[in-house]
Image (cartoon, rainbow, N blue to C red):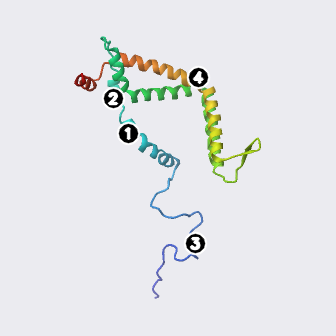
Amino acid sequence: MAAPEAETVGAVSPADKLPDGVKGTMDGERPPMSQVEELKKAIEPLKQRYGHYLTQIKPWREFIRLSKPEGDIQKRLQVNLTHFQINYAVIFLCQMVMAIIMNPQCLVVISVLAVVWVAFLKKNDDPNWEVSVGGMQLGKTQRWMALSAITAIVLLCVVGQVFFSAAFFCAIMVVVHGILHPIPEQEFSEINDVI
């Protein structure tokens, strides 16, 4: 009985080819296997950069405590605006999202703009893509600026009213809350130490 020959694993010479569809080098990083993993991977740098802001959200039970001001309106407003600024930002963001969702015109425009940007980003990486306006060639940066300006104008025209009305309502809510919320205990002790 003959001994079985040892089998080599992996590519030994350039003549040995990898199977079709297997390309690239091993860098130790596992590629995303689903769209959810791909989304998580795309969000990770944002989470690392801005995630610390989420830790600054004050408890909502503390946030909703209200009391009648006793002549300390200005002090309350100053302290509460600083103390609850992330909570106010979260409320504004939620309010904006709800206002946009409830306005179908905004949803359509934002969806169309998102599709245009995705197509543009793919096409803009093509070095052979040439765009000329009035006989003048536009470079990569100029195309970016042109689409950014168009996007800003469209958003201002369509979503502007929704944005500014939500911002106005949120500003009123922030001022009312800042006046009616008592000064938080830790902030109160710091103020007394300064005085």
Q: Earlier in the sequence, mark 2 or mark 1?
A: 1
**In the displayed structure, does residue 4 sit left or right of residue 109?**
left
Drawn side of residue 119 relative to residue 39, left or right: right
Q: Residue at x 46, y 81 (%)?
A: 6
Q: Is residue 142 above or below residue 158?
A: below
Depth check: give the residue in front, 164 or 22. Answer: 164
Q: Nearer the viewer, mark 2 or mark 1?
A: 1
Q: Is residue 115 visible?
A: no
Q: CA distance from mark 2 to mark 1?
A: 15 Å
Of the image marks 3 and 1, the number of the one nearer the N terminus: 3
The span from disc 3 to disc 1 (Cα, nearest Å) is: 47 Å
Question: The residue under label 4 is which amino acid type?
Answer: Gln
Please tell me which of labels 4 and 2 falls first in the chain. 2
Residues under labels 3 and 4: Cα distance? 60 Å
* Mark 3 nearby-residue class (10 Å; few <14, some 14–19, many ≥20): few
Mark 2 = which residue? 59
Rendered residue at 70%/53% (across/down): 128
Image location of residue 43, percent across then percent down: 47, 44
- Mark 3–mark 2 distance (CA, rounded to whole Å): 59 Å
Q: Secondary structure at mark 3?
A: loop
Q: Tell me the number on the disc at residue 111.
A: none
Q: Which labelled disc corresponds to residue 161?
A: 4
Q: Nearer the viewer, mark 3 or mark 1?
A: 1
Of 171 and 30, the residue lying toward us? 171
The x and y percentages for residue 151 are 63, 34
Residue, disc 3: 17
**Please, what is the three-letter code of the amino acid marked with disc 1?**
His
Q: Residue placed at 46% from the left, 20% from the top?
A: 171
Estimate the x, y position of residue 7 in percent, counting from the top left: 48, 78
Mark pair 4, 2: CA separation: 31 Å
